[in-house]
Amino acid sequence: MSDQTPPPGISKEDWAATPLAVRVLVTELLQRVVRLEARLNQTSQNSSKPPSSDPPSAKPRGANEPSGRKSGGQPGHAGHGRRLKPESEVDQIIDIRAEQCGQCGTLLLGDDPAPERHQVTELPQITPEVIEYRRHCLRCVACGASTQAPWPATMPPRSFGPRVQATVGYLTGRIGASQREVQEILATVCQTEVSVGSVGALEQAVSAALAAPVAEAET
């Protein structure tokens, strides 16, 4: 549902007379309610949640009739492993070579023209970057007056940079995470300590920054 479409129970005339900011807020709240209801209705039968997390009202999972076959992939079944990336997209290559012949013990040299390959995709360790701005005030040796340099225009006015603000806006607006959940994600994944109050302030700052582009896109 867009902010141009009135919610159920509201006429088109009343919806059109509602301020744009209120319509956007109502639309976001209704979308968040839909996502929360979908999350609450998830069980082990319609999601990857374990059966132990099912509420008492959930229907019990039906027992599967034994097929006589072992669990897992069956003989002759083609595998569906992750496709290997080309060497140009690999960041690090670790070559593993045997040092001596497994039969006679002779020293082995050279390279295998077609070595067996195995790739592991890993997330980089996130370490927050802390930037400190120091504004100096210098005294003139000629007249004795003190002059302090202005803060650079590129310096963020708040204690958190644009990437932190964008992450908070994405987690709260797109994912629907609560402010405490965002605080936990930033601390656990990004090693960045942000108070719940700061999360709310960053969320408001992102909303204010996006108000003009959203309004322009709607016209």
Image (cartoon, helix red, strand yellow):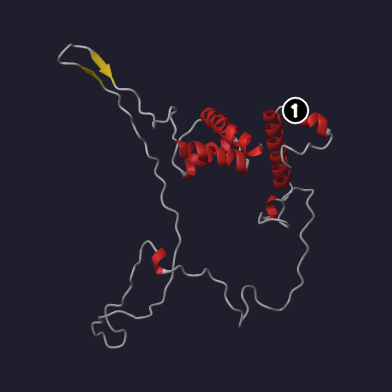
Residue at 72%, 52% in the rendered image: 43
| Quadrant of res 211 | top right
The residue most toward the bottom is: 104
Res. 177 in view: no
The residue most toward the front is: 219
Q: At numbered mark 1, what does the secondary structure look like: helix, strand or loop?
A: loop
37 lies left or right of 126: right
| Quadrant of res 159 | top left
188 lies left or right of 12: left
Task: Please give the residue where the numbered disc 1 appears in the rendered image.
Answer: 18
| Quadrant of res 109 | bottom left
Q: Nearer the viewer, residue 154 or 171?
A: 154
Q: Nearer the viewer, residue 127 or 52?
A: 127
Label 1 neighbour load within 10 Å: few <14, some 14-19, many 20+: few
- Above or below, 179 relative to 91: above
Q: Position of residue 99 (x, y in %)?
A: 27, 77
Total of numbered circles in the picture? 1
Residue at 58%, 36% in the rendered image: 213
- Above or below, 90 relative to 106: above
Q: Position of residue 20 (x, y in %)?
A: 69, 30
Residue at 64%, 73% in the rendered image: 71
Q: Position of residue 204 (x, y in %)?
A: 57, 29
Q: Nearer the viewer, residue 8 or 130?
A: 8
The residue most toward the left is: 142
The amino acid type, in three-letter code, at marker 1 is Thr
- Above or below, 125 relative to 12: below
- Above or below, 23 relative to 39: above
